[in-house]
């Protein structure tokens, strides 16, 4: 399997009040092909920041350094702004947590999908782009695509908004999709269907997927392998099917502290954080 | 008589042509010391029931009685001293420019209770923080600590009932475990009664003995923890919800 994405020793630093720097991501390595890779960890562990650096959309004051960052032959460290623009939304797509924040509130859904299509294909006519957008809504299982094309984002539910986001990303047929907590804002029954849909589309198009989530069980069902991040480091990398045999005490602790349906109503085990977890890394 | 009695509760938002019925004919009875769960998808009306009980959704019909005080007919201050609410997002529910100590003391001052300063420290210690945290602002605390402070503020008037609206869904699972343990400990120590809203059936199973399932403003089913565990629910909708949560 040839590498679609290679990250070596990625570090992200933020300036600290009163001088110095705070390291938010510390030496992350990731080499992936057209497969489904999950990144799990608590808030602040650096998982979203890692994803943002791939696209070069981290905050302006974040200093992002790496020994190597390549996407399918393109060196992301030396790429020009123009090259990065053509990757973003084109060959690398990103779906974020809350469609109500990610969609433009004052533009009709149809126009937003058409805009994405025409950014990728400047020659396509407006009429053809509209038809293509409509078909894409149909393939993300929106029942009345013609009606939904004319709605504004606030007029649709969270689940439908997330389907629209997925449609916008897939019209450009990216090679790599970054999905950042795509179902955390959705109800369980809706979220199950969205994940199936995402899985089908990624598999059928033979894409790479980086799936970021704080939900370990979800990730283990959905991905091929999982990186577990703690305090900016990857502390464990494990095949998703083996997640429940995780070796690192942090991963074990995260699994143990989740309540279960029908589990004992005794106090939940609480994660005892060790200072050493910050320093040792499994290294991917 | 139950600690929480809700009978034939209907709640609407808006007026005229824009009026929408969001809860229809809900009946809930929770015994003293019990933790009762309300589950359902977003928009099903579960939070609205809590909001109606607190007076945050004023257009309601039916009867709400908590710890023997009627929400409509009883004296308002007495009612609010029996019941307090904890919200989902502690960053939004705590005033950003009030020190933690002031936030916890405020309900006591409003109600002219004695020993405010000592009580504030006692409450901070009860939720696992220290007296020094009085002089911090919400943004200086972690999400879990902020939710503990919101719980301390809710306990400041020594209520008998807490209404918990998704109290851990903004938190990481490790922090969720700490907050759930704290809530259970406080309930046992103080004999509190909880009505908890959550979309997470595992949280409900961990906390509650009984729960009601809501759909489109109606309670479709009330079931015990056993039926939740075995999946032996009467309604197809409940079975779907349980299946999707495994």
Image (tube, coloured by chain):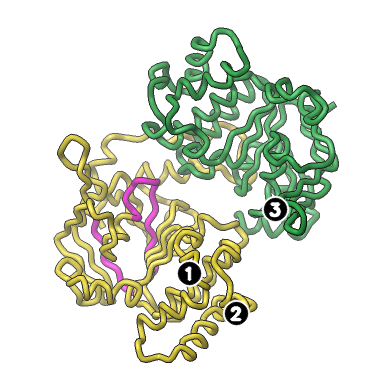
Chain colours: A yellow, B green
- Quick one: B71 or A62, which is closer to the camera? B71
Secondary element type, mark 2: helix
**A79 or A244: nearer the eye?**
A79
The residue closer to the viewer here, B15 or B40, is: B15
Closest to the camera, between mark 3 and mark 2, is 2
Measure the alpha-carbon separation of dots 3 and 2.
25 Å
Residue bearing mark 2:
A145
The reply to the same-chain question for discs 3 and 1 is no
Query: Residue B126's x, y, as percent?
Result: 52, 19
Residue A245: % across, % down: 42, 51
Q: Can residue B232 be seen in this view?
A: no
10 Å neighbourhood of mark 3: few (<14), some, or many (≥20)?
some
Bounds of the magenta segment: A28-48
Question: Label 3 belongs to which residue?
Answer: B44
Quadrant of res A212: bottom left
Chain of residue at mark 2? A
């Amino acid at each position: 399997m040839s590498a679609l994405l290679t990250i070596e020793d990625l570090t992200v630093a933020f300036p600290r009040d009163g001088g110095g720097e705070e390291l938010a991501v510390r030496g992350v390595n990731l080499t992936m092909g057209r497969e489904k890779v999950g990144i799990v960890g608590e808030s602040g562990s650096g998982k979203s920041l890692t994803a943002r650096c791939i696209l070069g959309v981290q905050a302006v004051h974040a200093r992002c350094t790496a020994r190597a960052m390549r996407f399918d032959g393109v060196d992301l460290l030396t790429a020009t702004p123009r090259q990065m623009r053509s990757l973003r939304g084109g060959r690398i797509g990103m779906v974020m947590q809350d469609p109500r924040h990610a969609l433009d509130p004052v533009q009709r859904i149809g126009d937003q999908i058409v805009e994405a299509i025409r950014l990728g294909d400047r020659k396509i006519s407006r009429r053809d782009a509209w038809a293509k957008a409509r078909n894409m809504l149909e393939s993300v299982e929106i029942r009345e695509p013609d009606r939904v094309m004319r709605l504004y984002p606030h007029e649709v539910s969270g689940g439908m908004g997330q389907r629209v986001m997925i449609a916008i990303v897939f019209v450009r047929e990216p090679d790599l999709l970054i999905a950042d907590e795509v179902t955390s804002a959705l109800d369980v029954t809706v979220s199950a269907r969205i994940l199936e849909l995402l899985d089908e589309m990624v598999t059928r198009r033979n894409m790479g997927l980086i799936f970021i989530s704080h939900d370990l069980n979800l990730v283990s069902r959905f991905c091929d392998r999982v990186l577990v991040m703690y305090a900016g480091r990857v502390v464990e990398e494990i095949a998703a099917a083996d997640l429940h045999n995780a070796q690192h005490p942090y991963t074990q602790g995260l699994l143990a502290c989740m309540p279960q349906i029908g589990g004992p109503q005794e106090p939940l085990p609480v994660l005892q954080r060790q200072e050493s977890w910050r320093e040792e890394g499994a290294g991917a | 008589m139950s600690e929480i009695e809700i009978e034939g509760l209907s709640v609407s938002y808006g007026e005229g042509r824009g009026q929408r019925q969001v809860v229809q004919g809900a009946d809930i009875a929770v015994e003293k010391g019990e933790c009762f769960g309300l589950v359902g998808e977003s928009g099903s009306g579960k939070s609205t029931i809590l909001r109606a009980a607190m007076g945050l959704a004023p257009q309601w019909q039916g009867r709400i009685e908590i710890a023997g005080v009627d929400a409509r007919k009883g004296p308002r201050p007495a009612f609010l001293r029996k019941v307090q609410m904890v919200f989902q997002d502690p960053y939004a529910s705590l005033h950003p420019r009030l020190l933690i100590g002031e936030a916890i003391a405020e309900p006591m001052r409003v109600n002219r209770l004695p020993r405010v300063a000592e009580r504030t420290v006692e409450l901070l210690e009860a939720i696992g923080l220290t007296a020094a945290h009085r002089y911090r602002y919400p943004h200086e605390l972690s999400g879990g600590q902020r939710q503990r402070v919101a719980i301390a503020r809710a306990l400041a008037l020594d209520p008998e009932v807490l209404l918990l609206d998704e109290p851990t869904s903004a938190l990481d699972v490790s922090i969720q475990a700490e907050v759930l343990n704290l809530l259970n400990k406080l309930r046992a120590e103080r004999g509190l009664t909880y009505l908890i809203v959550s979309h997470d059936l595992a949280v409900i199973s961990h906390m509650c003995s009984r729960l009601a399932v809501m759909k489109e403003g109606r309670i479709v089913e009330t079931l015990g923890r056993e039926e939740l565990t075995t999946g032996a629910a009467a309604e197809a909708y409940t079975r779907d919800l349980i299946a999707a949560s495994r």
